[in-house]
Image (cartoon, rainbow, N blue to C red):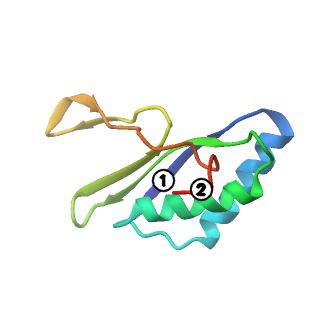
Amino acid sequence: MGFHIIDFTGHGVVASLNTFRFQSLVAATGFDGNDQAAYIAKISRRLYSMLPAGQLATAIGGYIDTRENVMRNIAAAGPKPFLISPDAPAGMYLPSDGRPLGMTNNS
């Protein structure tokens, strides 16, 4: 199971159109749970060429593999995800170090 939480700059119609752009890219980009960094970098490069100047997005995403009992996450300057697990019953913050999506043409 995979998930994305994304927040584009702006409000109203512009942010709605950007969300639609993102969803279209997700549908067109092959997801690889083992290499989420390459996946999100590809989406970011494509967003850079599509978004109006000054527009970008923060995001967090992840992949949960119940067969292997692992979770992998990726972040693009979004809020730090908070994980509660048997290994950390009190919870812990996960890193959120990546650049915002669509900010540059580089990964």
Q: Nearer the viewer, mark 1 or mark 2?
A: 2
Residue at the (71%, 49%) spot, across then down = 19
Relative to 43, is 12 above or below?
above
Residue at the (18%, 31%) spot, across then down = 89
Pointer 1: residues within 10 angstroms few (<14), some, or many (20+)?
Answer: few
Q: Viewed as shown, does residue 2 lie left or right of 59?
A: left
Depth check, front residue: 104 or 10:
104
* Three-letter amino acid code of the residue under disc 1: Phe
Relative to 19, is 42 above or below?
below
Residue 35 figure quarter = bottom left
Residue at the (55%, 64%) spot, across then down = 42
Q: Secondary structure at mark 1?
A: strand
CA distance separating discs 1 and 2 = 16 Å
Q: Secondary structure at mark 2?
A: helix
Depth check, front residue: 91 or 30:
30
Q: Viewed as shown, does residue 23 lie left or right of 84?
A: right
Residue 32 figure quarter = bottom left
Q: Is residue 52 visible?
A: yes
Pointer 2: residues within 10 angstroms few (<14), some, or many (20+)?
Answer: many
Q: Viewed as shown, does residue 44 lie left or right of 62?
A: right
Find the residue positioned furthest to the right.
13
Q: Earlier in the sequence, mark 1 or mark 2?
A: 1
* Three-letter amino acid code of the residue under disc 2: Ser
Q: Which residue is mark 2?
A: 44
Q: Is residue 1 visible?
A: no
Point out which mark residue 101 bears: none
Q: Which residue is mark 1?
A: 3
